[in-house]
Image (tube, rainbow, N blue to C red):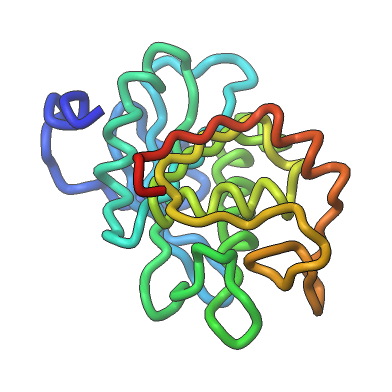
Amino acid sequence: MADAARRMPRVPAQRSARRSTPPARGVVLLRAVSGDPPLEAYVYLPRTLAPQARIIAIVHGISELPRQYLECFAPFAERHGAVLVAPHFSRPRFRDYQRLGRSGRGARADQALERLVEEVARETHARAGRVFLFGYSGGGQFVHRYVMAHPQRVAAAVVGSAGWYTFPDAGRRYPRGICTRGDRRFDREEIVRFLTKMTSNRGSPD
């Protein structure tokens, strides 16, 4: 994937034009997503967009390199006509993004991703119902917890080197287990059903 990123020309990401203008194709776009708090994200539309194109969300690790991650997937997007989005969960705004954003510890990163996907789907006519997810390191933590919290919103997911994980254990407090307070709820049966479709790649220390 790193080789693929090196083959792309390193030019400044273009700022998205006003929403009434169709997004540019074949270039990396930097956009601001409205909300509280706002979110910056990188978007890539292939030169040929597949009918009912799928959206792939790519989530960075704690090094916060969303553009580099997105560029690694650009050749794949060109082959399959898929739309790429890579949110930038910056500190301190999203300091708890790996755990989706717990009350008092940072903004809700899961809700910010959903706003991004909905905006991009509306502008490109891509499919927003179920997205594909990839996350590495801290992004892997976000992705597997997002899958557990919102299995109905995910088509498939790949997790790389998350380091530590939430388990579908209702007897353990979140984020070690799925016992929660407030507005976040986990459905253990739905989680277990979806986990059969998720791929996890890890190094020997994980």
Q: Position of residue 11 (x, y in %)?
A: 13, 41
Name the residue: 33% across, 39% down: 70
Q: Residue furthest bottom?
A: 104
Q: Is residue 125 visible?
A: no
Q: Nearer the viewer, residue 196 or 93?
A: 196
Q: Is residue 205 above or below residue 9?
A: below
Q: Nearer the viewer, residue 97 or 5?
A: 97
Report how many numbered discs are placed on residues in the image: 0
Residue 99: quarter of image: bottom right
Residue 199: quarter of image: top right
Q: Position of residue 83 (x, y in %)?
A: 48, 30
Name the residue: 31% across, 27% down: 26
Q: Position of residue 148 (x, y in %)?
A: 71, 50
Name the residue: 80% across, 78% down: 181
Residue 64: quarter of image: bottom left
Q: Quadrant of the N terminus?
A: top left
Name the residue: 44% across, 42% down: 58
Q: Position of residue 204 (x, y in %)?
A: 35, 41
Q: Is residue 121 visible?
A: yes
Q: Is residue 128 above or below residue 4?
A: below
Q: Nearer the viewer, residue 129 or 200?
A: 200
Q: Residue furthest front?
A: 204
